[in-house]
Amino acid sequence: MTEQKKNTAAAKPPKKLVPRPAPKAEVKAAPPVVEVAAPVATEAPAVVAAAPATAAATAKARPPRKPSRVDETVAKHQKVLAEALVKAQAIKYEQPQVMKQAAAKPAKAAKPVKPRKPKLVRDSYAMPEAEYARIGELKKRLAGLGSEVKKSELLRGGIALLAALNDAELQAVMGRVERIKTGRPAKDGKK
């Protein structure tokens, strides 16, 4: 069936384009030519002067061009639009404050506000081997309880506990921590 449609479409000659007729221009009657016999040379300039005067008079006496239907429609629509614009501008009203706030809130509610991630800081520190071994023990103990943690998470937990203590408890705990020499430890064999 599609082949038949293709064949019938190919068999039809294309539509002929018909040119639109040009708008008809109004034909004005030519001004009457005044013929004056001039046997005397003094009258010739008068005839020449009379021709321009009649051309100027006919130009002023022409009736105004009658507007076409399109021109009339455009003018009518422009008038209606101008009246509507004047009426719209005459109306003065303020939107209620509640409407403005209600419109602003859903836009913010549509986008969830992402909390800003804290900036991470890398640092190095030194500690005695026995305390470092305790980090491993605590990680194994927590893994047995069902939660795997990293070394940095353990240290942050310890800081959170220290921050929760009152001043007297904090001084007591920090008094039990041994003070060590800062800096990198010496390599074996070198001093």
Image: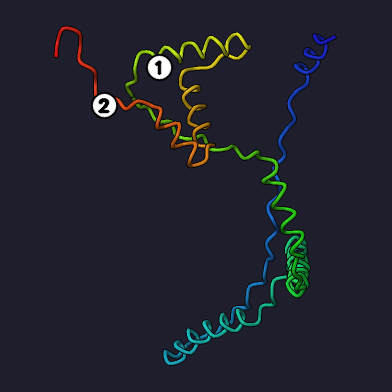
SS at mark 1? helix
| Mark 2 residue type | Thr
Q: Residue at x 69, y 65 (%)?
A: 26
Q: Residue at x 45, y 87 (%)?
A: 44
Residue sitting at the far bottom:
42
Q: CA distance from mark 2 to mark 1?
A: 16 Å
| Residue 185: percent from left, percent from top | 23, 17
Q: Residues within 10 Å of mark 1 (few under 14, many from 20)?
A: few
Residue 65: x %, y % from top left: 69, 71
SS at mark 2?
Answer: loop
Position in image of residue 175 (x %, y %): 40, 32
Q: Give the image quarter of residue 174.
A: top left
Looking at the image, residue 127 sits to the left or right of residue 1; the answer is left
Query: Mark 2, residues whose alpha carbon is within 10 Å: few (<14), some, or many (≥20)?
Result: few
- Seen in the picture, residue 181 relative to 78 is either above or below; the reply is above
Q: Quadrant of the C terminus?
A: top left
Q: Residue 172 sits in which quadrant?
A: top left
Task: Quarter of the image for the N terminus: give it.
Answer: top right
What x and y, as percent, mark residue 11? 77, 16
Q: Residue at x 47, y 91 (%)?
A: 43
First in sequence, mark 2 or 1: give its number: 1
Q: Nearer the viewer, residue 86 or 154?
A: 154
Q: Is residue 176 above or below residue 64?
A: above
Q: Which mark is residue 75?
A: none
User: Tag 1: residue type?
Assistant: Glu
Tag of residue 182: 2
Q: Residue furthest left?
A: 191
Residue on which the image places disc 1: 131
Image: 53 above or below 143: below
Q: From what the image shows, is residue 19 above or below residue 131?
A: below
